[in-house]
Amino acid sequence: MEDNKAYKDNIIVAENVSYTYTDNDDNENNDTEAIKNLSCEIPRGKFTAIIGHNGSGKSTLAKLLSGIMVPGSGKVTVYKAGDKEGISSDDENNDFEIRKTVGMVFQNPDNQIVATIVEDDVAFAPENIGIEPKEIRRRVDEALKTVGLTEYALHDTHKLSGGQKQRVAIAGMLAVEPECIIFDESTAMLDPGGRKDIMNTILSLKNKGITVVLITHYMNEATRADNIIVVDHGDAILTGTPEEVFDNEEVLKKCGLEAPQSTLVVQKLRENGIDIDARGVLDAQSASEAIDKALKAKKGVRDDA
Ligand code: ADP
Ligand code: MG
């Protein structure tokens, strides 16, 4: 049988998916078409960021990709490691397998904690999918270690900071041992320190071979990704590396997004007639390198003169 390209490269593939929230009052005019004929791919083992302004459809897309919701039309296929056929989210029989393969972490850490003791909370999800107690113990210890909360195993979940709670939620997800975790604005309610901790955790998950999808409105978080998907009005309108995506000033502006601060600074210099290469500038480090290069080039010209 011919090898399926999607299986080789992607863990989730969405093809022409649409999703409409229907009004409970049966008033058709109030239906919201949140996702419109959207296609996208989530590459296996990579870190993909999804960006887009409020209401563009990111959370709806995340729920479709994780099988929490089923598209009204189109198809979402999840490819577990070694599964060439893929499993479709519209078959109810696949719910359990998809839940074990793709996990989701949400925005509000308080809504995701169910137990009063940290390690009980982390054990909750693996218990729910019928993992044996001995294996649960191993997974809980490993998950807490991954998120840096080993010493908090017996702590009261209510007394943790927002960032720590979010790490407990991530540990609970890890204990299910999914191949992919989707974070829906999971850093949005945290202070800068908590955000940084979660970003570091996310990057360490990728290094462990877990596919990571991060929905974020922090552009400096998106620059850390391998790929970015830009969502606007329910469609994926732009996909590429951070360098490629943030070079599209016009498209970003159209969907109410801005490149990271460092990129903007260098783009502004270029707009003002400074001969500087703004491509690939995504953070303070690369901005300072580009400025340095531009200054040296200018000086070089003068030296020659
Ligand atoms: P984002 O996460 O990018 O802010 P969402 O996926 O939450 O976007 O929302 C996309 C659109 O769907 C918005 O217009 C929003 O108002 C609408 N929407 C989201 N959730 C619901 C819901 N449960 N019922 C009705 N409309 C919804
Ligand atoms: Mg959202």
Image: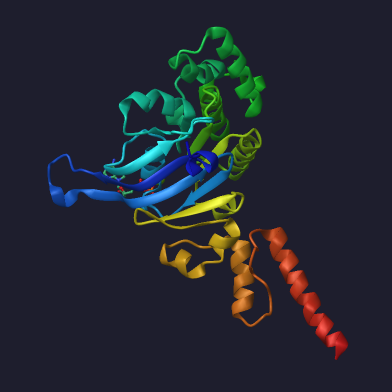
Residue pictured at 25% horizontal, 46% vertical: 20
| Rendered view: 186 above or below 178 | below
- Which one is in front, 147 or 133? 133
Question: With 117 as the anchor, is 234 left or right in this view?
Answer: left
**Can you give x and y, in whole percent of width and height, for residue 78 in the image?**
44, 35
**Can you give x and y, in whole percent of width and height, for residue 143 in the image?**
60, 23
Could you tell me if residue 203 is visible in this image? yes
Residue pictured at 43% horizontal, 16% vertical: 128
Question: With 237 as the anchor, is 294 left or right in this view?
Answer: right
Question: With 189 as the anchor, is 140 left or right in this view?
Answer: right
**Can you give x and y, in whole percent of width and height, for residue 39 in the image?**
39, 50
In the displayed orientation, state which residue is furthest to the front. Answer: 1
Residue pictured at 59% horizontal, 78% vertical: 271
**Can you give x and y, in whole percent of width and height, for residue 230 in the image?**
46, 55
How many numbered callouts? Answer: 0
The picture quadrant where one finds residue 275 is bottom right
Residue pictured at 57% horizontal, 56% vertical: 241
In the displayed orientation, state which residue is furthest to the left. Answer: 26
